[in-house]
Amino acid sequence: MRYRHLRPNPLIISDIHLGRDVLEGHGAGLVRHVAQLDHDLTAFLEHYALNLLGGRPWRLIVAGDMIEFIGMAVRAEGQITTPPTEEERVHGLGSAPDHALVKLARVFDRHGTVMERLASFVRAGHSLVILRGNHDVDLFWDEVQTDLRERLVALAGVEGSDADAFRMRVTFVPWFYYEPGLVYVEHGHQYDGLCSFDFQLYPVRPDDPRRLVDDVSTMALRYLVNPTPRLPRECGERWSALDYLRWVRTIGLGELARFTRRYFQMSTRLVQLWWAARGARLRALREEHLRRMKALPLAGVVGEATLRAIDALKSAPLTRSLLRTMQAVFLDRFALGLAVVVATLIAIAVGAPAWAVGAVAGAALVVAVAVLWASARQRTLDATASLRRAAGKLAQRVKARFIVMGHTHHPMRVALDEERWYFNVGNWTHEERSAGLPPIRAPMTHLVINAQPGSASAELRSWSSTDSIPRPFRE
């Protein structure tokens, strides 16, 4: 093999979300930039396949959310063996292994050019490492990993010993990638309660181990964003109350009523998730998670105690707390508004004079506003700061010059001390905006690490669509 004895240089990207436009049954795809994404990714892979650093091969590390499993809406009657639930019949296939395989096939159909170029990249002697994020948690299933790898082998057109060598260069990482002394890579969703899992290594549903656990962001995509026209995916993190009011004016009363119905269906489902995440079933999941942790090859590198310490840094999923779940989807506001109305009606029903009714209503409203103010201070939809804090704590537990994450779509570089840095490698998917506003262009950032022993360095770069070359990232 051409690069057999050379240490690869890490090349790190994240949050590509291939397949996020696959929305069968919901009209045209919400994302208008699939062709541009394919063009940019293909050019990116072509460039780095030919342009080496120090003559060493690349280890392309996709730091999570390569594939948009949770955000697809796929109909596939007759192609699956796991019967869909009522929810899956309405909102698209779920997370059972055979459901995920159908979704993966759709991604290869939709983004065939990218996948062909990725196969060529590996065939040229470079390697590919795919981390599991929250949007592609379906890569938990062994059969999904195998299918993805074999599809790449077929696209590469290699056979025999060449195919075996190719397979060895395509690996899947369930938690984090680590090269001692050099780099630690994790997706970052475990530090975001909207998207975190209790058990990253065994993220199955307590009530159905053939399906994966749902989080708040998954439910929002399936129930609200996918079936709702002109509702962009970034609304939950970036929209103000005024933005929502403007959006409501564009959709009409009929669509607003349907949206409201789906909203309360989603809220009911989240309460069910909270109820299911308790008791003996949860203890069984924890035991399996810990068993898999001990079996990780990393356990012999960093030690089981360090793995447990890293695991303990995660943010608890919001679905573990009924109050935090209500805050995340603004149910607390509905509940407090209802409480004000009920208090006023009770005062009227008992025959209180008008001034007393007004006093009760006013007092209830003041209490509601105070509670909402306190609740708003606890509600965090942007996890950028949380990941930054986690990076500092990780630097105390692992020996790595560079701590790297994705997830937030906000690229950054932060000095942790004189020797160590935290990088967030941003995203590659342009975001839709509401009617009349331009799309939010993805920074298409990536991290290039020179792994030269004794002089390792890292540079955050941004891909230029215009020139099809990388440039240093400018904040």
Image (spheres, rainbow, N blue to C red):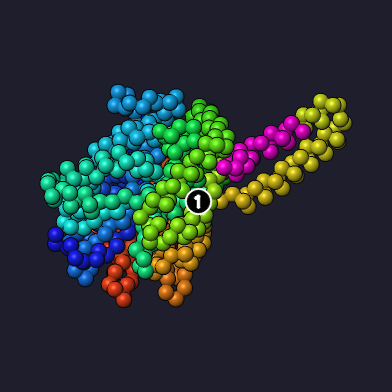
* 306 relative position to 113: left or right: right
Q: Which residues are magenta?
A: 320-343
Q: Vertically, is 315 above or below 321?
A: below
Q: Considering depth in this image, is 287 or 22 the residue closer to the camera?
A: 287
Instruction: Identify residue for label 1.
Output: 192
At mark 1, the secondary structure is loop
Across and down, in percent, residue 97 comes to 34, 35
Residue drawn where x is 65% and y is 48% of the image: 375
Q: Using the rendered view, name the quadrant where residue 177 is placed.
A: bottom left
In the picture, the quarter occupied by the C terminus is bottom left
Q: Considering depth in this image, is 295 or 26 the residue closer to the camera?
A: 295
**Amino acid under disc 1:** Asp
Residue drawn where x is 42% and y is 51% of the image: 293
Across and down, in percent, residue 73 comes to 37, 33
Residue drawn where x is 24% and y is 56% of the image: 127
Residue 195 in sight from this viewpoint: no
